[in-house]
Amino acid sequence: MVKRENLLIIAGIFWLIAGANVAAIGVQALLGVPQDHWFLMFGFMAVVFVGFAFMFRRVARKHAARILAHPADRVCVVHTFDAKGYLIIAVMMGGGIALRAFNLVPATFIGSFYPGLGTALALTGIGLLVSRFCGCVPGSQARRSGC
């Protein structure tokens, strides 16, 4: 059992580590692609990052609000994510592993998609960690007013 607010630390660390791993896989794939493709790949990477960063911001805000609204002061670590969150984690991890294991997409895709996705995941994790220590929900009005 941990303090409810500390679930934000667990979630933040989870997102940060997952993001760093995904980005590292992408960078490794990027290094195996001829450099003449990199310009387009970096453009796609930026689009992927922006798209996922906006989506994850919304998800993190709901996630943090759910954690902070839990009625008990001390909760089981399992409550870090809800059932939908665990399902999404399983599908995304399973899908990513399958894409690479069965070579379903080229290295140029992995090298441009994964770094953008991983960076967005990692920054979301950092946002959750910051929200724990400033006592506010990521993207909320309280955060914009100086939290």
Image (tube, grey):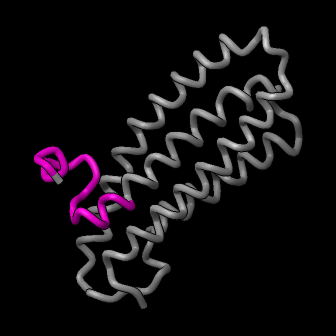
Which residue range is magenta in the image? 129-146
Q: Is residue 35 left or right of residue 95?
A: right
Residue 27 image offset from top left, x and y in percent: 73, 35
Could you tell me which quadrant the C terminus lies in?
bottom left
Against 73, residue 142 (above or below) is: above
Against 82, residue 95 (above or below) is: above
Residue with the most extreme left position: 145
* Residue 142 on the magenta segment: yes
> Which residue is more in the foreground, 75 or 147?
147
Quarter of the view holding residue 137: bottom left
Residue 57 image offset from top left, x and y in percent: 36, 44
Against 87, residue 59 (above or below) is: above
Looking at the image, which residue is at 66% across and 11% down? 39
Q: Is residue 118 left or right of residue 82?
A: right
Looking at the image, which residue is at 45% across and 61% down? 12
Residue 68 image offset from top left, x and y in percent: 26, 71
Looking at the image, which residue is at 30% across and 60% down? 131
Could you tell me which quadrant the N terminus lies in?
bottom left
Quarter of the view holding residue 28: top right
* Residue 66 on the magenta segment: no
Residue 73 image offset from top left, x and y in percent: 26, 87
Looking at the image, which residue is at 80% across and 46% down? 98
Q: Total of numbered circles in the picture?
A: 0
Residue with the most extreme top position: 36
